[in-house]
Amino acid sequence: MDFEDFDSVFAFDADVVYGESVRHKIEKNRRSMEGGLFIDRLLKTLGINEPGNNIYPPKSNQSLRQLHQQIIDSPSPDHHRQSVLYYVLRDLSRTDKDSHHASNFAKSVFLPEKYRIFIDGVWYLDRARFEKALDYLTEPVLIPTFPEEIVYALCTHPDQHDMHIPLAYYYAVSPPVTSPKVLEALYVKMAESSVTEALFWSRKQGPSMRRRLFDQLIHNVLDAPEGNDRARRSIELIHLPFDTEEEQWFLAYLTEGQGRNIPRAKDALNGRAVAKGRSDALAELGKGFGSTANSGMEWSGSSFEHGLMTPPR
């Protein structure tokens, strides 16, 4: 097949167009994906960077022909251009089972398997089908491409609520993550899964990021919505094996830092002191927050767990 010839690529229907419902769904997904869709990134790597993303999705057959021509005119390697065309052909499949136009194209141009697998993965990701995307994007044959962007999308997409999906991608692919916002987004999911695991992972980061993540861990655990999960994670938090520096950070964040205003800060300090066998420290911690009468809290070793589990009065 001559992939540079539009009528050859779209031989099944040279007048094909993106349906209105398909275009609306793509545009809706773009708005939900911070930083844009992955097809937008793929087009950008080809040097196709239309203002306002007007080139995709194409609004007519003529627009589709223009998109094809811009892909063909790109100086990028053949496999890269063919991969984007494969993505477009997937768009024009009505269902997963009706994707033979795309698969036939991949076979005709001898598109390497790793390119096809990657495009399948980001195509599902752009459609917010996260489990299907994960199946493809964690294939061992792949060289990680856009790994930080994928981690961030899996962590922050408003329709993605399963904490295990971004962690499964991260542990399977082991991508280098250097962006602070990606690190923090990943850390939130890690802490939701295991407070202990999150602590040990934070120790692998640089000094400033480590402290930033540590404070974030305390905040996310103690300021979470009421429920049994918050109680479990709070108890796990106060029993963590902090080193000397982390012990100081814990105290500082909850007595001097932003954590001081968390309603359960006093309960956490109380609980940590009890967990460490420092009952003599409770009075000093209480003084740091005012009298027990004013705080409305009983500073006894038996009360801290209840305080962590229930909302403030």
Image (cartoon, grey):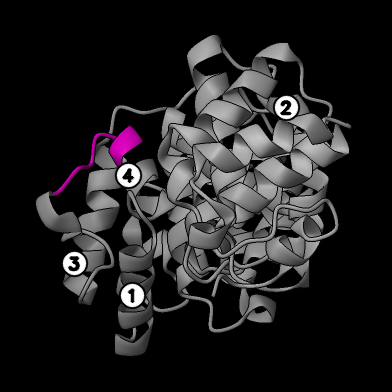
Which is more foreground, mark 4 or mark 1?
1
Give the CA distance from mark 4 to mark 1.
19 Å
Relative to 70, 225 lies left or right: right
Q: Which residue is mark 3?
A: 63
Q: Secondary structure at mark 2?
A: helix
Give the extent of the magenta segment. 43-50
Give the CA distance from mark 2 to mark 4.
35 Å
- Sequence order check: which comes first, mark 4 or mark 3? 4
- Sequence order check: which comes first, mark 4 or mark 1? 1
Give the CA distance from mark 4 to mark 3.
15 Å
Give x and y (percent) for residue 232: 81, 59
Occupied quadrant, residue 34: bottom left
Q: Which residue is mark 2?
A: 201
Is the Cβ of the residue at disc 2 closer than 8 Å to that at disc 3? Answer: no
Dot 1 alpha-carbon crowd within 10 angstroms: few under 14, some 14 to 19, many 20 or more? few
Q: Secondary structure at mark 1?
A: helix
Q: Is residue 118 visible?
A: yes
Give the residue type that dot 3 points to.
Ser
Q: Is residue 203 above or below residue 88?
A: above
Q: Secondary structure at mark 3?
A: helix
Which is more foreground, mark 2 or mark 1?
2
Q: Which residue is mark 1?
A: 28
Marker disc for residue 142:
none
Q: Which residue is mark 4?
A: 43
- In this rendered view, identify the residue nearer to me: 153 or 102: 153
